[in-house]
Image (spheres, helix red, strand yellow):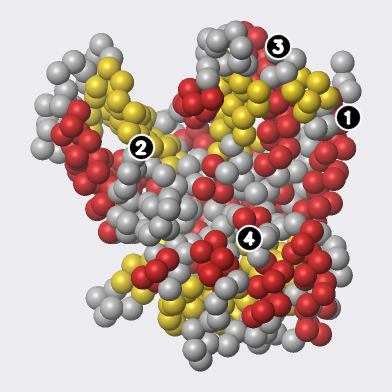
Amino acid sequence: MKQFRDSMIALITETSANLPSDVRQAIADAVGNDAADSRAGLAMSAITLNIDMAVDGLAPVCQDTGMPTFFVHAPKGADLLAMKRDIESAIVEATRTGKLRPNAVDSLTGKNSGNNLGEHVPVIHFEPWGRDEIEVKLILKGGGCENKNIQYSLPAEIPGLGRAARDLDGVRKCILHAVYQAQGQGCSPGFIGVGIGGDRTSGYDLAKKQLLRSVDDTNSDAALAELEAEILEKANRLNIGPMGFAGKTTLLGCKIGKSHRVPASFFVSVAYNCWAYRRLGVIVDPQEGAITEWQYRYPGEIKRMARGAGIPLTGREVVLTAPVSEETIRSLKVGDIVIVDGEMHTGRDAFHHYIMHHDLPEGLDIRGGIIYHCGPVMLKNEAGDYQVVAAGPTTSIREEPYQADVIEKLGLRAVIGKGGMGPKTLAGLQKHGAVYLNAIGGAAQYYAKCIEKVTGVDFLEEMGVPEAMWHLQVKAFPCIVTMDAHGNSLHQQVDEESFAMLESIGKEA
């Protein structure tokens, strides 16, 4: 199949940059559920604008392109080894051109392979079928939403909902709790796939395969179809909303599958996917390897998504330019819109762990500065300078064990990320005079356009592209204050209110 590798490059590129028709429709239907000038409305405006920008630039919708996972149906006699080699070669090429972020990291050494190849990476599921053609489906599921996957073993006591038995009501309680616990950390509004039964491994596999179903399909099992609709309705009453800012749209789709199990086990496995629901499929000619059909592309799909200007500037925003004074920070409160100009530095998991035990490189002083939880996609231009391809925020809660100490050690005034942070960080913000700024998760193109220049990088060789400390010059970079220096946290408030609603739903007959 001489064209199979090129077909896989096309599939990867399109999946990374252009959301499928059914996902576009689900997002479009949700726009307008909240007031345009509310936090939820501004988040949806940025999301829809970002979707258009990704297509226009043929660039990743979200900088976290996850672990590429392929589902391949092949006819009898197909050369699976050759297909595997071509898929791997396509992965390397797509990484080189910035369609994928290098995400394959050795679990023990932390070393990034740099090309998205590694032990058991990419993930490729081969299955035989009776048709003569080849089907390849690809899902790119980022780490933020992957971390919000959850599995329950029934019977169990579900927080806020009580005893969950080994029955459909017990399954219902598990799924509702799964949506609640994701909050804004999974880049809501999201989609969920649920697997009932199996073992611990096959249950998660079944859950992820539910994400291959179309958003607008109807479950062939009447009881599960009814449950899918019920979950969608009740989840959107939790008032978690886009990005966890509170709002009427928390969940955009729910798909449930079931599997037989052994008598001793009853697992409910939930795969959570963010709004940047990147999955496409192709039918391939088994002789030449050319694409003969695209899946999840419908006639008359919505081509342009933007319903606004993202987070529009009104002139009432507070502009932060490092070094920022403590007085300026303490004047901010939850809900304020902030515009960052000037110097900003990225720092993620590896950086936070490192800086707890080491100092910054000699000559680098970022007191009064701003750290950005971001693992960008970077490419070098012909002049040898780095250019930002995609640069949305990563989930901040992973840095909770370190953040307050890092704020104190480095003298930081602002932390930018998504999904919020916990009580230790909140106390640190109050003590040291700093704020947490929530950027719009997944809006990798929206924020990349705010970055004027890469001024330098540290720890690139040791940590790899996503984890390196990139030094950036930004202009008109918009965020929302969601944790201030006075002990207030929007994330804590939404969590408490949505939990109360979860308890209320649980009491309904």
Give 79 or 98, whichever is nearer the viewer.
Answer: 79
Rendered image quadrant of residue 314? bottom right
User: Where's residue 209, x and y in %?
Assistant: 47, 26
Structural crowding at the residue carrying mark 2, measured as other residues with C-alpha within 10 Å and reported as few (<14), some (14–19) or many (≥20): some
Of callouts 1 and 4, the N-terminal one: 4
Asked whether the residues under the numbered discs 4 and 2 touch, taking CB atoms below 8 Å apart as contact, a structural biologist would say: no
Residue tagged by mark 1?
A: 504
Kind of residue at badge 2 = Val
Q: What residue sits right under mark 2 in the picture? A: 123
- Answer yes or no: do the residues labelled 2 and 3 have beta carbons within 8 Å? no
User: In this rendering, would 262 be left or right of 384?
Assistant: right
User: Which quadrant of the figure contains the C terminus?
Assistant: top right
**Residue 297, which numbered label?**
none
Q: Of the residues under marks 4 and 3, which one precedes in the sequence?
A: 3
Read off the residue under disc 3.
167
Closer to us: 186 or 9:
186
Disc 4 from disc 2: Cα separation? 27 Å
User: SS class of the residue under badge 3?
Assistant: loop
Q: Dot 1, crowdedness within 10 Å: few (<14), some or many (≥20)? A: few
Look at label 1 and name its amino acid. Answer: Ser
Q: What element carries label 4?
A: helix
CA–CA distance in space, label 2 to label 3: 33 Å
Q: Position of residue 173 (x, y in %)?
A: 74, 24
- Marks 1 and 4 sit apart, C-alpha to C-alpha, by 32 Å
Q: Which of marks 4 and 2 is nearer the N terminus?
A: 2
